[in-house]
C-alpha cells in the first residue's frame, strides 16, 4: 500500500530519526510494517516561537493496508513513468537560443533532448571565467560590461542565493529540480520547502547543463551577442551575431535577461511589439544573521535542525503603494550588480551553507508605468538608469555604494558612520543619504513601512541595520508581447523568461524556457 503522509509534526530533537520510524509513528504501526519511506517535503514551522518544529511530507509504502487511515494520509496510485522525449523531425534550420540564464539553459536543454541541435549563444563568458571577472570587479571596482553579475553563463541567478521556490504551479517545476540535481545540485532541493542551491553550488551545476547540451548535439558560443534579426515579411529567416556573422534560422528563443537594455532598444526600433511593465525599486537591507535567527526561532535558536532563518515581509500603505522584501539571502552578502559604466546597482547573494555574518534582502517599493510619466515601452529602462547613475555619483563615482543606517534614514539625516552591522558590499560603501539616489515617493514609502514591518519581525527596523542602494533589477521593466503559443510579433520569435516579462526567478524562468522550447518543437515543420 502506497500512501502520502502530509503535515507530520516532528520535534527538533527528532530530526535525525530514520524516515521509516517517523512513518511508523505517524501511521501507528510497527517499523517492520514500513517497506520504504521517501521524504517529499520538509519545512520549519516557527509560527509559535514556543513550539518551533519540523513539518514533513512522506511517501510511504507499507507491507499491508493500514486501517483506519490517519486524516493526514491519502492513498497514492502508481503512475506510469513519463515517456522519454521523442526524437523530433529536424527543422530546416537549427533553432537559436539567445542567453544562458535559467530560461535559455533549459530551453537549450529541452531542444537538445528533442534532437534539434540548438545553437545557444551568450554575450558574456563561461561561468568559470565570469566568476573571476566578477571577483575582480568586487575587489578593484573595475567593471567589465561584457562579463559581470548580469551578463554571462548562468544569468543573474548565478550570483544570488540560488532560490528555487516559486509561486507557479506547473509540473515542469519538478522536472527542473530533477535536472538540476542530476547536474550536481544537492539532493536537498528535491524535498526542501524552500529549496536553494547557493551561488557556489549553482555555478558547477550550470556548467554541467551546458555540457549536457553539447553532448546531445547542441552548440554553445560565448562572447556572442545577437545584434539583429533578418526577416522576410513578418517571418524570421536569420540572425546577425556580433554585428557581422549571419546564421540562418527561423526559430529564435529570446532569453536575454532583464538587463539586456541594448537588445530591447534595437528590437523596439525594428517594430517588435513590447510594452512597459511594472517593477520595483529600493535598497538592500542588512542585519546580523544572529538577530534574524533569534527573532524567528525564539528559544530554539541554534538548534542543529535549523538553518539560517529567513523572512518574507510585505505591507500595503494607504496610498496604494506596496513595500516588500524580495530575494532574502540568509547568511549572505550584498553584491555589486552593475552592468553599465557609470551606473550602480546592488543585489544579494549567499553560498549554499548560508553561514555568513549578515542577512540581507531587497526592500522594494512597487513602480508602475504611470510613475515614468511616459508611455514609451522603454521608459522604465530610462527610469532605472536615472537612479543607478544617481547612486553611482552618491557612492563616489567608483562603484562604492551609497549606504545609510536605518536609524539615520528614519530620522531623515545622512549617515557618517555605521553601527553594529558591518556592510558586506564590496568594493565598499559611502555613508550618505539614500534620498540622493531614490525617488521621493520611494523613500517616503520606505520610511512609512519600516516601523510597520518591524511589528511583523522584531528588530527589522533596528537603528544599526544598513540600507545599501540602489536595487533596481528585481525584474524586467519591459514585456515583449507574445501570443498563447509563445510567439512574438515576428513569426519565429519566442520572447522568453524574466527579461521578456514572463518569469520572476530561477524556477519560473527555467519553466518558461522549457515551455518556449516545447512550442518550437510543436511548431516544427
Image: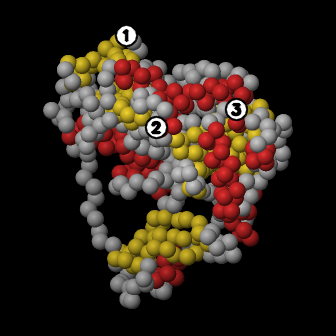
Q: Nearer the viewer, mark 1 or mark 3?
A: 3
Q: Is residue 359 visible?
A: yes
Which image quadrant for residue 245?
Answer: top left
Question: Could you tell me residue 384's position as x and y percent?
Answer: 55, 31
SS category of the residue bearing label 1: loop
Question: Label 3 neighbourhood size at 10 Å, few (<14), some (14-19), many (20+)?
Answer: some
Q: Which residue lies furthest to the left in this view?
A: 525
Question: Could you tell me residue 202's position as x and y percent?
Answer: 53, 42
Are the two marked residues, 1 and 3, in contact with CB atoms closer than 8 angstroms? Answer: no
Question: Label 2 neighbourhood size at 10 Å, few (<14), some (14-19), many (20+)?
Answer: some
Q: Give me the residue at 52% from left, 54% from top.
A: 195
Return the residue nearer the eye: 33 or 90. Answer: 90
Q: Which of marks 2 and 1 is nearer the N terminus?
A: 1
* Residue 10 badge: none
Q: Give me the residue at 72% from left, 28% from top.
A: 394
Residue position for label 1: 244
Q: Which of marks 3 and 2 is nearer the N terminus?
A: 2
Residue position for label 3: 436
Residue position for label 2: 369
Question: Could you tell me residue 438's position as x and y percent?
Answer: 64, 36
Left or right, 75 with respect to 151, comes to: left
Q: How far apart are marks 3 and 2 (CA)?
A: 22 Å
Q: Quadrant of the N terminus?
A: bottom left
Q: Eyeballing the image, is 449 above or below 210? A: below
SS category of the residue bearing label 2: helix
Q: Quadrant of the C terminus?
A: top left
Q: Can residue 212 be seen in this view?
A: no
Q: Residue furthest top?
A: 244
Return the residue nearer the eye: 397 or 413. Answer: 413
Q: How far apart are marks 2 and 1 (CA)?
A: 36 Å
Amino acid at each position: 500500500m502506497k500512501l502520502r503522509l502530509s503535515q507530520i509534526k516532528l520535534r527538533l530533537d527528532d530530526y535525525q530519526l530514520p524516515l521509516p520510524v517517523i512513518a511508523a509513528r505517524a501511521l501507528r504501526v510497527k517499523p517492520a510494517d514500513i517497506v520504504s519511506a521517501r521524504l517529499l517535503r520538509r519545512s520549519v514551522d516557527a509560527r509559535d516561537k514556543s513550539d518551533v518544529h519540523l513539518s514533513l511530507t512522506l511517501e510511504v509504502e507499507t507491507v499491508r493496508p493500514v486501517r483506519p487511515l490517519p486524516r493526514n494520509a491519502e492513498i497514492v496510485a502508481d503512475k506510469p513513468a513519463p515517456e522519454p522525449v521523442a526524437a523530433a523531425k529536424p527543422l530546416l534550420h537549427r533553432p537559436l537560443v539567445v542567453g544562458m540564464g535559467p530560461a535559455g539553459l533549459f530551453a537549450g536543454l529541452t531542444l537538445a533532448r528533442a534532437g534539434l541541435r540548438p545553437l545557444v549563444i551568450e554575450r558574456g563568458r563561461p561561468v568559470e571565467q565570469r566568476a573571476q571577472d566578477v571577483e575582480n570587479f568586487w575587489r578593484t571596482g573595475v567593471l567589465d560590461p561584457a562579463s559581470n553579475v548580469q551578463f554571462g553563463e548562468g544569468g543573474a541567478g548565478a550570483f544570488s542565493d540560488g532560490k528555487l521556490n516559486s509561486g507557479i504551479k506547473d509540473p515542469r517545476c519538478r522536472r527542473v529540480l530533477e535536472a538540476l540535481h542530476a547536474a550536481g545540485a544537492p539532493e536537498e532541493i528535491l524535498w526542501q520547502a524552500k529549496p536553494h542551491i547557493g551561488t557556489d553550488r549553482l555555478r558547477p551545476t550550470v556548467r554541467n547543463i551546458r555540457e549536457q547540451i553539447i553532448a546531445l548535439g547542441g552548440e554553445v558560443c560565448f562572447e556572442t551577442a545577437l545584434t539583429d534579426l533578418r526577416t522576410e515579411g513578418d517571418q524570421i529567416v536569420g540572425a546577425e551575431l556580433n554585428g557581422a556573422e549571419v546564421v540562418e534560422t527561423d526559430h529564435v528563443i529570446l532569453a536575454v535577461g532583464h538587463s539586456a537594455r541594448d537588445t530591447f532598444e534595437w528590437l523596439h526600433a525594428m517594430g517588435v511589439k513590447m510594452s512597459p511593465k511594472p517593477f520595483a525599486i529600493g535598497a538592500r537591507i542588512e542585519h546580523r544573521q544572529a538577530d534574524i535567527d533569534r527573532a524567528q526561532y525564539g528559544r530554539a535558536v541554534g538548534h542543529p535542525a535549523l538553518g539560517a532563518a529567513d523572512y518574507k515581509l510585505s505591507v500595503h500603505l494607504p496610498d496604494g503603494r506596496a513595500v516588500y522584501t524580495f530575494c532574502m539571502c540568509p547568511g549572505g552578502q550584498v553584491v555589486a550588480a552593475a552592468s553599465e559604466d557609470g551606473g550602480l546597482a546592488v543585489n544579494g547573494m549567499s553560498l549554499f551553507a548560508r553561514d555568513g555574518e549578515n542577512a540581507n534582502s531587497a526592500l522594494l517599493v512597487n513602480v508602475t508605468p504611470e510613475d515614468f510619466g511616459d508611455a514609451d515601452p522603454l521608459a522604465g529602462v530610462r527610469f532605472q538608469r536615472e537612479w543607478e547613475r544617481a547612486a553611482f555619483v552618491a557612492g563616489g563615482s567608483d562603484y562604492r555604494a551609497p549606504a545609510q543606517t536605518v536609524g539615520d534614514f528614519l530620522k531623515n539625516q545622512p549617515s557618517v558612520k555605521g553601527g553594529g552591522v558591518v556592510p558586506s558590499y564590496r568594493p565598499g560603501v559611502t555613508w550618505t543619504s539614500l534620498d540622493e539616489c531614490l525617488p521621493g515617493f520611494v523613500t517616503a514609502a520606505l520610511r512609512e513601512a519600516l516601523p510597520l514591518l518591524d511589528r511583523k519581525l522584531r528588530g527589522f527596523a533596528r537603528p544599526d541595520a544598513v540600507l545599501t542602494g540602489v536595487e533596481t533589477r528585481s525584474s524586467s521593466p519591459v514585456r515583449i508581447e507574445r501570443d498563447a503559443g509563445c510567439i512574438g510579433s515576428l513569426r519565429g520569435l519566442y520572447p522568453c523568461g524574466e527579461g521578456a516579462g514572463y518569469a520572476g526567478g530561477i524556477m519560473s524562468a527555467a519553466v518558461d524556457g522549457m515551455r518556449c522550447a516545447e512550442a518550437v518543437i510543436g511548431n516544427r515543420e
